[in-house]
Image: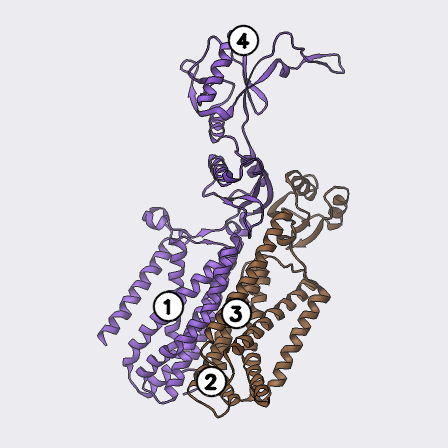
């Protein structure tokens, strides 16, 4: 019952976090990667020692490759970001990086994406986001079609959607901070992470709403708020544990997994964490709040 | 009771067999892998380009010259030609696929080429873009001006080019090229067979040029200038130049693979070095093992006997998934491995929902066997509903995704489906089979969980 009694505090925490995330999205902005914008990314590792970054910067200034951004990676490597490159430009880039063969190197990764491919991916991402959101809203409407007392089923759906938005917006806000301070870029996996959070976070909310549904049917508790409070007491442990197991594997992916999916794992971890928070501390308290407003009228 | 024990044993045996298959079909885990049964040898994990290293190329096909109704036919023809060219260079398991234009994928007709193991993009694009241009030219009329140039040393060079003029006959009318060896000199030569139109053209050319030279040009350079002795009506010609058997073989391959039906241009290229891919695989395996161990520890400490059974069910779940990856087969990418690892976390969810229910039922004073049944029965609706939304996301991601997203959506979606089966079926059979340990204090402790006694 503790959660329901202090519902206004918990709801306020969520509102503040969401507002902060939106603010950070506007202040820091989202750095968009070459997947969407087009461009080229070259990763090289030098055999013996890597040349000074300033030397390479100067060498690139005299070339006609547009802006070239060089970042050190590991002990012997550089990641080079540039506009998308054709074959000649690519060999020129490699030649310049190796200082005309003086510093032998190995190219570990090369990715050049034309602007039209980037546009296609952007369109695909938008369509996927719209469809996943629609699919999940329809599913929520379907899952809660049978509960209609004392508040109608579409309100359960609405609360689930609100907590869903909360679960996605906060990790995106965190990502913009990562993007600002550590140079993380929104790529395809960023979109996948956002959509996966949509899928995973709603499942938690459903576990708790399912319990409320059952308790309403069995007439546990004298008032709606008491029923919701009891349902929360009964189910918050399992809600935390089911998320905990997923967070465990996500953290092990973040700490030990492949380099290319670190930010992806981190964003999903944040999504799972706030997904659990919202299903316990946001969605159900909101339901009670709505019921209280209704009965006041 | 006996029935329940038998089903437990059957599941354990099946699980063991599946695990044995996974173990036996991994080269790294078997010292004398070469001597294994071919069934095992032919079932490795299929790794995506980002893990195995290789090149991923996206071409745009210019179909503006093709009639609206024939676009898909010429795209298929394009794919066949590119596929033949790629195969010629001995790339193992290349993937060449057409992406037609549409509302989702945009207005362009695209061709996507995956070349595992090819990390030299320049070489890769060269071998795909190469169109062997075969031309037949005849001697220019004697009165045509010959172009001579005088360089600064005063040396006069006669440009051989304008000596010959183009004819209509090109490699387009070629039906087949074969490599032959001259019976006396053992020199390799390429024999050409024209199609109907080509045969007519060739007959005409040879008829009008008896006693004169006909030059055969390849990629703009003359490779052979035989003198015509008589009209050749059967559409057969032979190119003998100074090429080695290997060059001859390559030429035949290139001629047979034909010209591109539509021009293509490169839109995007990606190359991943083999070392980077190998590191990603190792990291993925490490993350999976650590994640699994922590979850197993948590389950056994918190849910005791039930937790132990959940770990057993999880092991069977993992081996089933690995077997499906091998047999279907599923192409594994870094994101795909991540999807699978996340599904390990999700697979436990269903068990946790059931065990928490079980604990509640035990607290409300039911006998263990009733509580087990009720726990499974009552948890089912939340398990079904909570997994459904993840499946929706996975299906839509798979439908729209690029190969990277597809790998993730597929392993995650499969994982959720298989995990529902493993949690419901396998855990249930194990738990209800173990009910025989009785109603004693110890038994109740073992079936309960958390800090409760």
For this orientation, the residue located farthest to the bottom is A222
Rendered colour, chain A: brown
Rendered colour, chain B: purple
Residues A10 and B27: in front is A10
Task: Answer yes or no: are tags 4 and 3 on the same subunit.
Answer: no
Residue at 35%, 72% (x, y): give it: B427
Task: Answer yes or no: are tags 3 and 2 on the same subunit.
Answer: yes
Residue at 31%, 48% (x, y): give it: B37
Q: CA distance from mark 2 to mark 4?
A: 99 Å
Q: Nearer the viewer, mark 3 or mark 2?
A: 3
Which chain is indicated by disc 3?
Answer: A
Are there few (<14), some (14-19), or many (20+) residues within 10 Å of tag 3?
Answer: some
Which labelled disc corresponds to residue B212? 4
Mark 3 and mark 2 in contact? Answer it, CB < 8 Å: no
In this picture the colour scheme is by chain
Q: Nearer the viewer, mark 1 or mark 4?
A: 4
Q: Badge 1 is on which residue?
A: B422
Which labelled disc corresponds to residue A234? 2
Q: CA distance from mark 3 to mark 1?
A: 28 Å
Q: Secondary structure at mark 3?
A: helix
Q: CA distance from mark 3 to mark 2?
A: 26 Å
Residues B98 and A67: in front is B98
Q: In the rendered view, would you say A247 is above or below B199?
A: below
Q: In the rendered view, would you say B65 is above or below A267?
A: above
Q: Quadrant of residue B232?
A: top left
């Amino acid at each position: 019952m503790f959660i329901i009694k202090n519902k206004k505090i918990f709801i306020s925490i969520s509102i503040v976090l969401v507002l902060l995330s939106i603010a950070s999205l506007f202040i820091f902005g989202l750095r968009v990667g070459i997947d969407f914008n087009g461009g080229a990314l070259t990763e090289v590792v030098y055999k013996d020692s890597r040349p000074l970054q300033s030397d390479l910067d100067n060498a690139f200034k005299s070339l006609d490759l547009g802006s070239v951004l060089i970042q050190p990676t590991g002990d012997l490597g550089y990641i080079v970001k540039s506009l998308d490159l054709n074959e000649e430009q690519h060999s020129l880039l490699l030649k310049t990086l190796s200082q005309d063969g003086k510093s032998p190197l190995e190219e570990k990764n090369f990715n050049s994406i034309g602007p039209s491919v980037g546009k296609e991916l952007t369109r695909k991402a938008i369509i996927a986001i719209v469809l996943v959101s629609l699919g999940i809203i329809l599913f929520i409407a379907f899952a809660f079609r049978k509960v209609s007392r004392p508040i109608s089923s579409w309100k359960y759906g609405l609360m689930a959607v609100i907590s869903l938005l909360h679960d996605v917006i906060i990790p995106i806000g965190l990502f913009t901070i990562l993007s600002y301070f550590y140079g993380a870029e929104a790529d395809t996996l960023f979109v996948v992470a956002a959509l996966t959070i949509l899928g995973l976070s709603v499942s938690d909310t459903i576990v708790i709403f399912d319990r409320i549904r059952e308790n309403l049917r069995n007439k546990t508790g004298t008032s709606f708020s008491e029923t919701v409070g009891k349902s929360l007491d009964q189910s918050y442990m399992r809600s935390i544990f089911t998320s905990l197991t997923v967070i465990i594997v996500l953290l092990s992916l973040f700490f030990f997994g492949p380099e290319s999916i670190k930010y992806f794992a981190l964003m999903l971890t944040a999504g799972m964490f706030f997904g659990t928070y919202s299903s316990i501390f946001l969605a159900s308290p909101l339901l009670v709040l709505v019921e209280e407003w209704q009965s006041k009228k | 009771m006996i029935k329940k024990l038998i089903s437990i044993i059957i599941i354990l045996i099946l699980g063991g067999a599946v695990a044995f298959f996974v173990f036996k079909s991994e080269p790294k885990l078997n010292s004398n892998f070469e001597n294994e049964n071919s069934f095992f040898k032919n079932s490795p994990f299929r790794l995506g380009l980002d893990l195995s290293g290789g090149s991923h190329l996206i071409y745009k096909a210019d179909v503006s010259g093709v009639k609206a109704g024939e676009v898909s036919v010429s795209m298929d023809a394009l794919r066949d030609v590119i596929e033949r060219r790629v195969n010629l260079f001995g790339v193992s398991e290349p993937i060449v696929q057409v992406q037609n234009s549409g509302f989702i994928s945009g207005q362009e007709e695209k061709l996507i080429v995956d070349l595992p193991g090819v990390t030299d993009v320049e070489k890769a694009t060269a071998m795909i873009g190469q169109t062997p241009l075969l031309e037949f030219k005849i001697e220019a009329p004697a009165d045509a001006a010959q172009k001579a140039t005088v360089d600064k040393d005063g040396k006069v060079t006669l440009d051989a080019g304008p000596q010959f003029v183009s004819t209509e006959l090109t490699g387009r009318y070629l039906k087949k090229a074969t490599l032959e060896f001259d019976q006396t000199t053992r020199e390799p030569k390429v024999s050409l067979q024209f199609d109907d139109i080509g045969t007519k053209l060739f007959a005409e050319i040879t008829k009008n040029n008896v006693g004169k030279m006909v030059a055969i040009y390849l990629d703009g350079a003359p490779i052979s200038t035989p003198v015509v002795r008589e009209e050749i009506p059967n559409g057969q010609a032979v190119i003998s130049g100074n090429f080695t058997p290997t060059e001859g073989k390559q030429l035949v391959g290139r001629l047979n693979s034909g010209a591109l039906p539509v021009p293509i241009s490169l839109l995007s290229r990606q190359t991943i070095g083999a070392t980077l891919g190998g590191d990603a695989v190792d990291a993925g395996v490490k993350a999976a093992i650590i994640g699994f161990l922590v979850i197993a520890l948590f389950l056994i400490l918190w849910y005791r006997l039930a937790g132990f059974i959940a770990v057993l069910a999880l092991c069977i779940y993992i081996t089933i998934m690995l077997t499906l990856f091998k047999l279907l087969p599923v192409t594994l990418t870094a994101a795909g491995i991540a999807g699978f690892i996340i599904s390990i976390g999700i697979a436990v969810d269903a068990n946790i929902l059931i065990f928490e229910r079980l604990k509640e039922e035990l607290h409300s004073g039911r006998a263990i066997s009733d509580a087990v049944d009720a726990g499974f029965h009552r948890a089912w609706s939340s398990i079904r509903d909570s997994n459904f939304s993840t499946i929706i996301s996975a299906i839509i991601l798979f439908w729209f995704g690029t190969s990277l997203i597809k790998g993730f959506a597929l392993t995650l979606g499969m994982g959720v489906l298989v995990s529902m089966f493993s949690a419901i079926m396998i855990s249930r059979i194990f738990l209800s089979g173990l009910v025989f340990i009785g109603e004693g204090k110890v038994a109740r402790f073992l079936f309960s969980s958390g800090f409760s006694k």
